[in-house]
Amino acid sequence: METTLALADAFGLLAHAGTIIALASAFITAVAICRGLPNHAGVAAAGWLIGAMLSLCATFAGNWLLPAIATAALPAALVVTGAFFFARAALSPRSPIAHHPTPEHCPALRHPADESDDATDSVTTMRAPDAARPSVTV
C-alpha cells in the first residue's frame, strides 16, 4: 500500500510540473503569435503538448482537474490572441493583416521582364521544339 501512495505522490508532482509547463508554454505561444514569430510559436506549442501529457499523470491519483487546466490552456490562449488581433486590426488606421506587398516594396515580386536592363537577366529559358519531345502514348 505504501508503494501505491508513493507512486501517487510522484505522479502528482509530475502532473503539477506538467500543468505549469503547459500554462507557461501556452502563454509563450500566444506571445510568439502576437509578435509574428511562427517558429517560436511552434516550439512553444510542442512544449504545451509535453506539459499536457505530463499533466495526465494526475489521473493515476484520481485528479482530473490538472489535465483539464493544462488541456484548456492553449485553446484559451489562442482565443485571446485572435481577439487581440481583430481588436488591433479594427482600431489601427492601417491594418497589418490587410497589407499586401507590391513589387515596388518587395524585390521577390518583381518580374524579370519588367526590368529595363537586359544585362541583369542572366538566365534564359529555351523550349525544345515539338519534334524533339518524346511522345507518350497510353
Image (cartoon, rainbow, N blue to C red):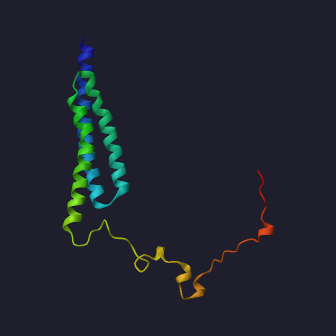
Asked whether 58 or 69 is in front, the reply is: 69
Q: Residue at x 29, y 30 (%)?
A: 56
Q: Position of residue 61 (x, y in %)?
A: 24, 22
Q: Position of residue 41 (x, y in %)?
A: 33, 52
Q: Residue at x 63, y 77 (%)?
A: 123
Q: Given the current orientation, which residue lies at the most extreme right position?
A: 131
79 up-or-down from 97: above or below: above
Asked whether 2 or 35 is in front, the reply is: 35
Q: Position of residue 8 (x, y in %)?
A: 25, 21
Q: Residue at x 24, y 59 (%)?
A: 85
The image quadrant that residue 3 belongs to is top left
Q: Given the current orientation, which residue lies at the most extreme top position?
A: 1
Q: Residue at x 23, y 22 (%)?
A: 62
38 up-or-down from 19: above or below: below
131 up-or-down from 110: above or below: above
Left or right: 37 in relation to 58: right
Q: Position of residue 79 (x, y in %)?
A: 24, 49
The image quadrant that residue 98 belongs to is bottom left
Q: Given the current orientation, which residue lies at the most extreme bottom position?
A: 116
Report the quarter where the N terminus lies. Answer: top left
The image quadrant that residue 125 belongs to is bottom right
72 up-or-down from 128: above or below: above
Task: Please tell me how many numbered marks the rendered image carries.
Answer: 0
